[in-house]
Image (spheres, grey):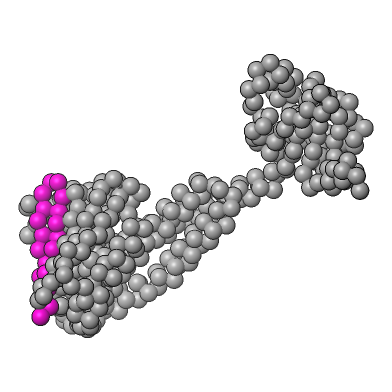
Amino acid sequence: MKNSELLQAIVQNAIDGIISINEKGIVQSINPSACKLFGYIPEEVVGKNISMLMPPPDQLQHDHYLRRYQVTHKPRIIGIGREVTGLRRDGSTFPLRLGVSEVIYHETTFFVGFIHDLTQQKEVEERLKDYAIHLEELVEIRTQSLNETIRALEIAKEQISNSLENERELSKLKSRFISMASHEFRTPLSTIQLSASLIDKYAEPAGITEISRHTGKIKGSVTGLTAILNNFLQMEKLETGKVEANMSEFDLVELSEEITEEMQQLAKTKQVLNYTNVGALSDITLDKNLLKNCIVNLITNAIKYSGDDAVIEFITENNAGNCTIQVKDNGIGIPKEDQKYLFQAFFRAHNTGTIPGTGLGLNIVARHVELMNGSVEFESTANGTIFTLKFRTA
């Protein structure tokens, strides 16, 4: 087969449309795929100005663009390619990606356009955008419902405390209610989280950053609500004596690096979490799960109450007989008049404003540290806060 015959066969059987024009914009050839896209037969297009395939205002500007390119050789499409709109024979329009190459053959200049129909891609993008918006609306409704339920839980606690004479009956009723509510909400929250992740996965090939932004907000809201439910459930277990310290030996540095990686994913976009180990030893004997819960709570607070570009320091020091863990931030600090109440359940400093929270995290930290025979201290100013956990390990 001759090269010219092979080239002709390739053009005629190409999936994308291929059209060639001369320097005056007159169509010299059009392949079957392009004819199908625009709804013409070759005889209706060849010999006509290419502008017949363009809607206004491109139709009127095309010849001017060709002349300007021939003078300046500064391309807007030629050699670059971009998304444009095509005009079919029936008057309808469709989106397409157009790439144009300049070809010189026997001292004659031609322009060859390669046309890829974007109709299906655009339809998929629109469906994904609509789905993301719809899912975000559903999450907002569920978030509002969950927040109202949590507020109702707090109100119910106070009302039940005032109405029941027997403290033991109150404790059992409250524990059952909190445990039931926490477990009941976990399933829909997990479903929402999974759906948001699937949207991210299916939207990634289309390159729609707007969808990732929306799903990020969804997953952030779900993570926050899950943490609130976990705190309520953990508080219930502490109050009923179901939490005990199970001491075992583990690698503190390895655990801390794992926590740092997890928490960096939850930090605000420009926040940085720096982990440093200055101790001589790595292995330690404590309750690994309780310690991780304490550190996660402290870092979560540092992320929540620090600025968008804050640097949060996480430091461990494990030497013979003593272990110190510090979390430092440069956030809003804790007002001096509020510091004496800081570890009380449901207490929140008056400068937290609209930042969400339950006031349970630090109370849980203090009680977990106590179970491991440790102590928790803090220093706070308007420029930030340092929390320090201390343990005797020998």
The main secondary structure of the magenta stretch is strand
Is 129 positioned to the left or the right of 147 in the image? right
Residue that appears at 29% across and 65% down: 257
Quadrant in the picture for the C terminus: bottom left
* x, y percent for residue 29: 86, 33
Q: Position of residue 31 (x, y in %)?
A: 85, 40
Residue displayed at 79% across by 40% down? 17
Q: Nearer the viewer, residue 292 or 280?
A: 280
User: Tag count in the figure?
Assistant: 0
- Magenta residues, as a range? 374-394
389 relative to 246, above or below? above
Above or below, 163 relative to 312: below
Is 310 a magenta residue? no
Residue 107, given in percent of the width and then of the height, sits at: 81, 23
Q: Nearer the viewer, residue 233 or 299?
A: 299
Q: On the image, which quarter does residue 7 sit in?
A: top right
* Residue 352 visible in the displayed image: no
Q: Residue at x 22, y 68 (%)?
A: 294
User: In the depicted view, which residue is nearer to us: 151 or 277?
Assistant: 277
Q: x and y percent of residue 382 in the render?
A: 13, 46
Note whether 43 is above or below 17 in the view shown: above
